[in-house]
Amino acid sequence: MPVERRDIRTLDHDVRWHVSAFRIPRSGADHADRVSRLRELRARILYDNGRRPEFRDACGAHVDDQELDYGAWHFIARRHPRGPVLGYIRLSTPETGELFQSRAHLGEQRYEQLLAEEGAEPANTYEHSRLVVEHRARKLGLGVYLNAVAIGAAHHLGAKLMIGTSGTKDGQDRFHGRFGFHPVPGTRCYVERYTEDVVILRHRTADGAGEYTDLVSELRHRFPSLMHDDPAEWASAGSENPPEPAALTSGVAPDRDAWQPVLLEPCHAADYATLTALLESDHITAVYDTIDAQLAELISCREPHLRHTEAELEHKIEEQLAGVEPWAYGSWFWYPWSGRLVHVLPREEFRLVRADRNRGKIERPQQRQLREHRIGIIGLSVGNSAAVTMALEGVGGAFRLADFDDLSLSNMNRLRASVHHLGVGKAVLCARQMYEIDPYLDIEIFTGGLTDETMTEFFHGDGTPIDLLVEECDTPYVKIAARECARALRIPVVMDCNDRGMLDIERFDLEPDRPLLHGRIGDLHAADLPELTPQAKSDLILAMVDADRISPELAASFGEIGRTLSSWPQLASDVALGGALVTSAARRILLGRPCESGRFYVDLDHLISPDYNTAATHDGIPA
């Protein structure tokens, strides 16, 4: 018996889906392979990385064997005819009514009572189930269209009543409610296989399909005219699915070089075409679209004194959209190193909302002023903390980052990163982290670090010099050469020494003749360093950090480096404090607030001591 087939092409905000429908006969061994592929597809998505463990057996195979698969319609969805399968739903017909899941859940007597209450008979009752969508397609409307396709098909086939089971953990029951499905009272209960509460839903076809009535009606009428048979295409249905995580051990190397997100604004024809092509590719791992929530926050930030009703808020959002479809509003950013596609508000609105909680300490005019500045950062271990904190706080809108080194395992005691970042360049990693905080930043990176060849480009760029330098590198030559260049260009320099909370500030913008490092290195120039002996270089470093003021632990470590220690000790808490100190100083300098040259200590070992305890007690009574 041939497999019946219909193809349906549907459109969601100009995103085209290719949906194929097949009816598997109830008997016959010719279709076992097709059913097996469908079951594996469903079970893999339902397993959901272990959320529902019963959909995977002890051998690691995904299992969802149900007799209902025979005699039912199966709908599979792709972006294009030969693309990977992204979603699936099943529509069971009266032919297998005795096997319906909802019937087993309700019990025979309650099931027959429900049909009688709805004026339906077994011959015109259909069951829809197993709506599963790949994560990367869930925010693109695929679930809506698959549901509409199955409901439209049931309407066309003469269904008077549709029934089905639905999970509730992620709001699936509410999702189906938008199609006119209503819960059957008293049917909600926990089901171990699904690890959540399940409820029985029913849908009268005569009542339409809720907010999707027009779409379901359109698909109902198109359904019979799109029938054709192409077994070859169906044969490939399971072969192009993404591989299982276990299969990814084939040696495919992650992208260690990409660091710039791709900005796509659908209102522009070229960006729309690029976005469409990207969605049809296999380069997207997940789609994140929270634009509705972002718009609601935007309204709240602009009118914090008002408490809008839900209807008022919807009206305000419609006014903000000004006729633009929500999917086309703002910007989409694709992050090639992770494959994520993220939808955010337009630049100014995004930044207004993201920095709204800064107000009261940094007002909006100052926020805008800070974003006009370009900051250079050399050395991205300690400097990473400063860079990320600046991105979070909105201090600087453009950055130049320089570091020649790659992330190693021993860096991870103080540098915020994950184990999958090992081997990634520190400049690349830092740029990625900053772009994931604010994708509208302007960032340049120097993966070879700062050298004589790149010094001019780092400080001057293409005619846009930096306004402030954060220097956090380990190389004495670069520390001095960078300061010589900064002083010549009247650029202030900020440095955290990662010990005792020592913050160093050199206001070359106000004092162009100021001696480097407050005169602690005398008249030494960068050009003199190659002539120094190793001992002289060690003495130079001690002079830079002020040997008399460093912590006892750091002082003791110098003699142990290369003997019992691989390098000088550094702690994440000290690095985090340094990021805060550098950001605070940079903010003061860039806003023109008092911040003089000097060396300052925020020594937590000293400050978190009994002498500074403001809640200390005397004779048992709080001070």
Image (tube, rainbow, N blue to C red):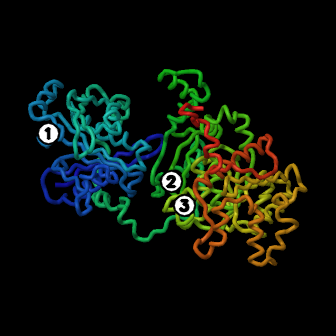
Q: Element at badge 3?
A: helix
Residue 278 has which mark? 2
> Of callouts 1 and 2, which one flags the residue occurring earlier in the amino acid sequence?
1
* Callout 1 touching callout 3 (CB < 8 Å): no
Question: Of circles 1 and 3, which is in front?
Answer: 3
- Is residue 321 visible in this depiction of the protein? no
- Residue 175 at x, y percent in the picture: 35, 35
Residue at 74%, 63% in the rendered image: 547
Spot occupied by residue 377 in the image (x, y as percentages of width and height): 71, 57
**The N terminus: image quadrant:** bottom left
Mark 1 lies on a secondary structure that is: helix
Dot 1 or dot 3: first in sequence order is 1
Q: Please identify the quarter of the rendering in which residue 430 is found.
A: bottom right
Mark 1–mark 3 distance (CA, rounded to whole Å): 55 Å
Q: Report the Cα–Cα distance between label 1 and label 2.
A: 43 Å
Camera-side residue of 59 and 414: 414
Tag 1: amino acid: Ala
In which quarter of the view is residue 151 placed? top left
Q: Indicate the quadrant containing the C terminus: top left, top right, bottom left or bottom right.
A: top right
Placement of 92 over or under 79, stated as above or below: above
Q: Nearer the viewer, residue 143 or 591?
A: 591
**Distance between the alpha carbons at the discs numbered 3 and 2:** 37 Å
Local secondary structure at mark 2: helix
In terms of depth relative to the viewer, which is nearer, 129 or 60?
A: 60
Q: Residue at x 20, y 54 (%)?
A: 2
Residue bearing mark 3: 413
Q: Amino acid at mark 3?
A: Asn
Q: Amino acid at mark 2?
A: Leu
Residue 104, label in figure: 1
